[in-house]
Image (cartoon, rainbow, N blue to C red):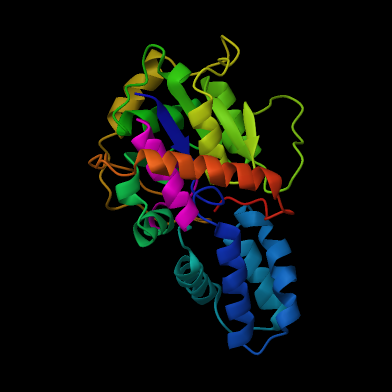
Amino acid sequence: MPLLLLDLDNTLLPRDAAFRAWAQEFLTERALPPGDVDWLVTLDGGGYVPRSTVLSAARRRYGLDETLAGLLAHYRRGINSHIHLPARNVEALRAARAAGWTLGIVSNGGTRPQLEKIRRTGLGPLVDGWVISEEADCLKPDPLIFEIAAQRCGVPPTGDWAAHTWMVGDHAPADIAGAELTGLRSVWLHHGRPWAEPGYRPTLKAAGLPEAVGQVLAARNAPAPRPGIRAGGVGARRRVAGVAGAPHAQAQPRERERGLAGVRTPAAAVGTVTAVATVAAVSSAATRTTAGPAGVGAA
């Protein structure tokens, strides 16, 4: 069964939109200049700037008496309250499942906040498993995290598994470089940005998740990645087996939104052939109406 691995923030979930909504709320609650939303969004760097840096800078700018810990708690509550799973992305996942694909999430981030996103948005029943870097003790682009994801989705990372696996994500150094190193095909969600990495390239590019899924479903015979680039091996696979049974509990939150192990979800038969047609239609429309940048984000 082919395997489709998906990034979480700004791929499955519109994380940057949630940050902007939190920033507006943060300013409004404190009677601060509403025009400073763009200042906060720039400082956030799509989630790749440490939370302590963002919140400490905001605390100094506005002369806030609140503690950094209090601001961090406000941030974590706020951004996850604004996270949602777009209906078009649900349709895309159902279409892939109906077409016979196994689905998994691979996310860099903190265990508790990333797991909360998966639970809050209802993603759990739509995928077969997930892995988040904090509990796995490895980060994209390390090939090991992709092997762990495959294992947790019920696809042993042995033999030619990589030849039947795709990765979809928006962050080139983590998602696309990681796919390249692991020997996977990939789709980069460009969000209106030009490709800027000279050393590697995605197999395909798309404006959003529905278009990406539509391309994957239509590209089963796409050329395989260059031979010999995949990392990992017997030692890595032994480690995969050891981590795959990690419990959900007792993970420690860290800086940035880093996450928890995915346990295989019963693969309910969701979606229909009609959903596949819907993704194709949405993909076509997305290709014709690509908009400007939507941010360069992760957690």
| Residue found at the far bottom of this picture | 31
Total marks placed:
0
Nearest the viewer among 12 and 68 is 12
Taking the image as shown, residue 2 lies to the left or right of residue 49, namely: left
User: Which of 150/234 is in front?
Assistant: 150
Front in this rendered view, residue 233 or 41:
41
Q: Which residues are magenta?
A: 87-112
Residue 74 magenta-highlighted: no
Q: Is residue 220 above or below residue 287?
A: above
In the rendered image, the quadrant that contains the N terminus is top left
Asked if 119 appears above or below 188 in the picture, the reply is below
Where is residue 181, by image quadrant?
top right
Q: Quadrant of residue 5?
A: top left
Q: Is residue 258 visible?
A: no
Q: Is 219 located above or below residue 81 in the figure?
A: above
Residue 47 percent location from the top left of the image: 60, 56
Q: Is residue 91 magenta?
A: yes
Q: Could you tell me residue 224's position as x and y percent?
A: 55, 15
- The answer to whether residue 211 is visible is yes
In the image, 48 versus 287, the foreground residue is: 287
The residue shown at (56%, 38%) is: 212
Point 73% across, 62% down: residue: 42
Please provide percent x and percent y for residue 79: 51, 67
Left/right of residue 250 with respect to residue 280 in the rendered view = left
For the point 33% across and 40% down, the residue is 129
Q: Residue at x 36, y 37 (%)?
A: 97
